[in-house]
């Protein structure tokens, strides 16, 4: 596909298939899936499962409705660590299934489940159980929860972990609807990315329905001691009973967020929008499971200063859930649009000055990521090449922040009115479909660039999508509120006492800016002065605490180490864990990192463990 317009050359490496730019599920295979949906694809799942907290397993039957080509001889599903006990077709015809070999050096791919079918086969029934150490499943004891009454289970399927708890065609380009019936211990509530209950079932049986087609990475399950509280006509919060009121208060702007998002880019297509605040071991800030965002408790700061994360996950209801990256190489299409959209929601609710702070932080984080990867690294391209690698390696600030700044550049060329019309049309015309980078370029060329050729005469799309680093024409964003922070930093560096600085009313983002601007050679005495004035050590706001502890490690400010140890043993969000362990490993404090990790590792999710085992070493 060639995108050509005045002053711009956009040739690029061709895709392996001439159908790569199509958005139909059946048009391509995925390098991170062993399935062949071009031959036979599952379009609907009926899932019957039992959750066993004693054995840490999920067992049951996955019944897939098929759409297959006339000459299809088999259907292939992705599995990883599943024990397959029986397979039948169309109800009672026993099938002689086989499991393929694992790929040497690529354990994340799992094994292909081959099931023979004929042209007349309508359904396959797969009876199975998961492994106790299934990577997507986090089993928590009652003692690891807030209220300590019941154990807890949650799933994390992105990127290709759904195959560890459901046999499926585990690529983002395959969408399906599902119904489910799940048995859990009585007294506990079960929730899925589907229509959800708002009270505990007397018999522990829950039934779910998801009528909109979703990819496997958006299939989710949470089971625990949970309560629900509404915060709007279409929005609400789930959390442990002692915590639900505080969470609902913190997230009370959810309905306003939803309505602001709809005003920008069209009607919300998923019915309700709820959030579940999970136990601390959840490895991410949030996960955009349709109808119910899974969120870390680290966003509950007490002052609504971290609710941009909810705006981000809500924005995914359009970018990602509605229009989905076709493969993980196209991950930026999910996250770049979502960061951009998130910022627009925050601007609508809290003003341009607030949104500008977020943009500046995004840019500074992007600069650091490019520096870490290397300015010529292929991992700083928007379009990635992850074949043969765990797609989780593609999760970086590049997809998020470089993607968002690319979209801001496009907006700046035509103005917000034309840009918003383009984005609205993009979501509307591609709803419930998948999108490759090349298909997006084609859509962009046809619907925005060609009608506005002169405006894009000096824009090289290739430099952004297929090139490394940060292009020179990246928009420059400034923040008046950060300028005021920088003025206080200058005073402190010039000798003013920390207690004399004008910090009243600062948001989390202003405090982060302040900490990030501290000089590399700040003395332990100055660190102590800051700590005494602002109580950074032991801060309840996890964003501020994490930034401070990283500075403390790099400056060997040991007065914070006990609190940092406690912090690392009480949060599981990878965003917070990696910088602290990395700082210890880079500053000659490997023994400290290994000591803390040995104690804390069992409380972390597999996703976090996987990254930290590589960094610190498995205890």
Image (cartoon, rainbow, N blue to C red):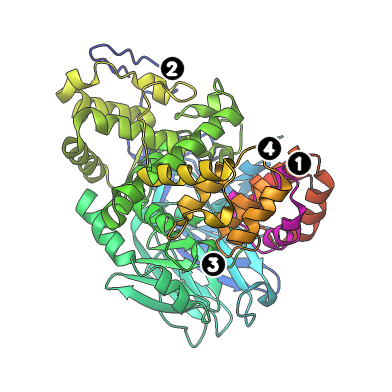
Q: Which residue is mark 3?
A: 278
Give the Cα distance between marks 3 and 1.
29 Å
Q: Which residue is mark 1?
A: 585
Q: Quadrant of residue 177?
A: bottom left
Query: Quick one: which residue is furthest to the right in this view?
Result: 591
Give the residue displayed 26% in from the left and 44% down from the top: 427
Residue 580 percent across, percent down from the top left:
68, 48
Residues marked 3 and 1 touching at CB (< 8 Å) = no
- Sequence order check: which comes first, mark 3 or mark 1? 3
- Sequence order check: which comes first, mark 3 or mark 4? 3
Give the Cα distance between marks 3 and 2.
42 Å
Q: Which residue is mark 2?
A: 13
Type of secondary structure dominating the magenta stretch: helix
Give the residue displayed 72% in from the left and 50% down from the top: 525
Question: Badge 3 local density, few (<14 within 10 Å), some, or many (20+)?
Answer: many
| Residue 115 belongs to the span the image colors magenta | no
> Which structural element holds mark 3?
loop
- Sequence order check: which comes first, mark 2 or mark 4? 2
> Which structural element holds mark 4?
loop
Give the Cα distance between marks 4 and 1.
19 Å
Give the Cα distance between marks 1 and 2.
39 Å
Residue 319 percent across, percent down from the top left:
34, 46
Residue toward you, 539 or 320: 539
- Sequence order check: which comes first, mark 1 or mark 2? 2
Q: Which residue is mark 4?
A: 521
Give the residue displayed 26% in from the left and 53% down from the top: 348
The vertical placement of 369 against 185, above or below, is above
Residues marked 3 and 2 touching at CB (< 8 Å) = no
Numbered range of the magenta stretch? 552-577
């Amino acid at each position: 596909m060639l995108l050509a317009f005045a002053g711009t050359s956009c040739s690029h490496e061709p895709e392996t298939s001439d159908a790569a730019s199509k958005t139909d599920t059946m048009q391509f295979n995925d390098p991170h899936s062993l399935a062949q949906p071009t031959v036979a694809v599952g379009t609907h799942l009926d899932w019957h499962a039992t959750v066993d907290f004693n054995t840490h397993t999920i067992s049951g039957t996955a019944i897939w409705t098929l759409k297959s080509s006339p000459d299809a001889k088999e259907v292939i599903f992705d599995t990883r660590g599943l024990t397959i006990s029986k397979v039948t077709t169309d109800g009672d015809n026993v099938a002689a299934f086989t499991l393929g070999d694992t790929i040497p050096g690529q354990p994340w791919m799992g094994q292909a489940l081959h099931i023979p079918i004929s042209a007349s086969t309508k359904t396959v029934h797969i009876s199975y159980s998961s492994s106790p150490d299934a990577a997507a499943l986090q089993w928590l004891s009652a003692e690891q929860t807030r209220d300590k009454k019941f154990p807890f289970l949650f799933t994390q399927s992105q990127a290709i972990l759904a195959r560890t708890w459901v046999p499926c065609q585990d690529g983002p380009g395959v969408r399906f609807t599902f119904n489910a019936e799940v048995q859990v211990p009585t007294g506990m509530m079960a929730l899925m990315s589907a229509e959800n209950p708002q009270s505990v079932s007397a018999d522990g049986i829950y039934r779910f329905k998801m009528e909109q087609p979703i990819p496997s990475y958006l299939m989710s399950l949470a089971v625990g001691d949970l309560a629900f509280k509404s915060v709007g006509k279409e929005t609400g919060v789930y959390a442990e009973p002692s915590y639900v009121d505080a969470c609902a208060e913190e997230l009370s702007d959810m309905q306003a967020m939803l309505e602001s998002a709809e005003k920008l880019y069209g009607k919300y297509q998923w019915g309700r929008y709820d959030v579940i605040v999970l136990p601390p071991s959840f490895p991410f800030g949030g996960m955009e499971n349709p109808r119910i965002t899974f969120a870390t408790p680290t966003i509950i700061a007490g002052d609504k200063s971290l609710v941009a994360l909810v705006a981000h996950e809500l924005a995914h209801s359009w970018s990602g859930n509605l229009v989905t990256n076709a493969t993980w190489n196209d991950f930026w299409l999910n996250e770049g649009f979502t960061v951009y959209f998130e910022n627009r929601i925050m601007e609508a609710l809290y003003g341009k000055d607030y949104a500008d702070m977020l943009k500046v932080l995004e840019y500074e984080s992007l600069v650091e990521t490019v520096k870490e990867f290397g300015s010529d690294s292929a991992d700083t391209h928007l379009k990635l090449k992850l074949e043969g690698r765990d797609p989780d390696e593609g999760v970086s600030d590049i997809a998020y922040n470089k993607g968002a700044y690319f979209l801001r550049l496009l907006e700046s060329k035509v103005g917000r009115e034309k840009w918003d019309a383009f984005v609205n049309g993009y979501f509307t015309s591609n709803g419930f479909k998948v999108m490759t980078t090349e298909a997006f370029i084609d859509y962009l060329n046809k619907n925005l660039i060609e009608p506005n050729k002169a405006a894009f005469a000096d824009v090289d799309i290739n430099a952004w999508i297929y090139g490394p680093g940060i292009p020179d024409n990246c928009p420059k964003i400034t923040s008046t509120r950060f300028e005021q922070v920088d003025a206080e930093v200058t005073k402190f560096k010039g000798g003013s006492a920390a207690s004399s600085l004008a910090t009243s009313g600062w948001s989390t983002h202003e405090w982060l800016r302040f900490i990030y601007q501290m000089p590399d050679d700040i003395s332990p005495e100055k660190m102590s002065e800051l700590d005494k004035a602002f109580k950074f050590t032991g801060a309840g706001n996890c964003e501020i605490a994490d930034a401070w502890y990283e500075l403390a490690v790099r400056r060997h400010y040991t007065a914070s180490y006990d609190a940092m140890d406690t912090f690392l043993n009480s949060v599981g969000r990878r965003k917070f864990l990696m910088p602290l362990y990395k700082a210890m490993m880079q500053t000659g404090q490997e023994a400290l990192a290994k000591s803390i990790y040995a104690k804390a590792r069992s409380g972390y999710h597999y996703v976090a463990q996987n990254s930290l085992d590589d960094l610190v070493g498995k205890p």
